[in-house]
Amino acid sequence: MRAAFQPSPPRQTDRAAFWLMMQVGMIVGFATSYPANHGLLLRGLEERMPAEPEAALQFGPPPGGAPRWNR
């Protein structure tokens, strides 16, 4: 239990192994999430993402104001 609260050493982001494993993680994440999202779309439980950022604003800006990409 004590080991869970020990600070971890800083990540060495200047190493090729770090970026290789980052890419492996992105590929694995995509491969595992794609079937779940596809199934949600087929069942109508999820909506497709708009192709353009402006299409997301067809009902006006969000309650907090303009979206971040326009600030």
Image (spheres, rainbow, N blue to C red):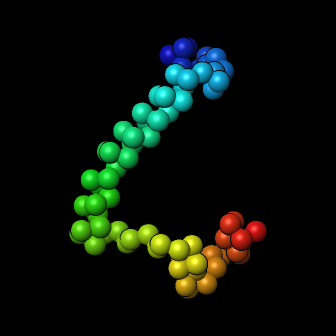
Considering every residue shown, the one lying at the far front of the view is 16
Q: Residue at x 23, y 69 (%)?
A: 43
Q: Nearer the viewer, residue 46 or 55?
A: 55
In this figure, what is the number of numbered marks?
0
Residue drawn at x 67%, y 70% is 67
**Where 8 sits versus 60, above or below?**
above
Residue extending farthest bottom: 59
Residue 33 pos. (x, y %): 34, 49
Quadrant where the C terminus lies?
A: bottom right
Left or right of residue 7: residue 17: left
Residue shown at 32% from the left, 45% from the top: 31
Residue 37 location in percent, x, y?
A: 32, 58
**Whole-percent x and y of residue 36?**
29, 54
> Extreme top residue here?
2
Q: Is residue 41 above or below residue 35?
A: below
Closer to us: 19 or 68:
19
Q: Is residue 16 visible?
A: yes
Q: Is residue 7 visible?
A: no
Residue 69 in picture, x, y percent from top left:
68, 66
Residue at horizontal 55 percent and vertical 85 percent from the top: 58
Q: Is residue 37 above or below residue 43?
A: above
Q: Quadrant of residue 70?
A: bottom right
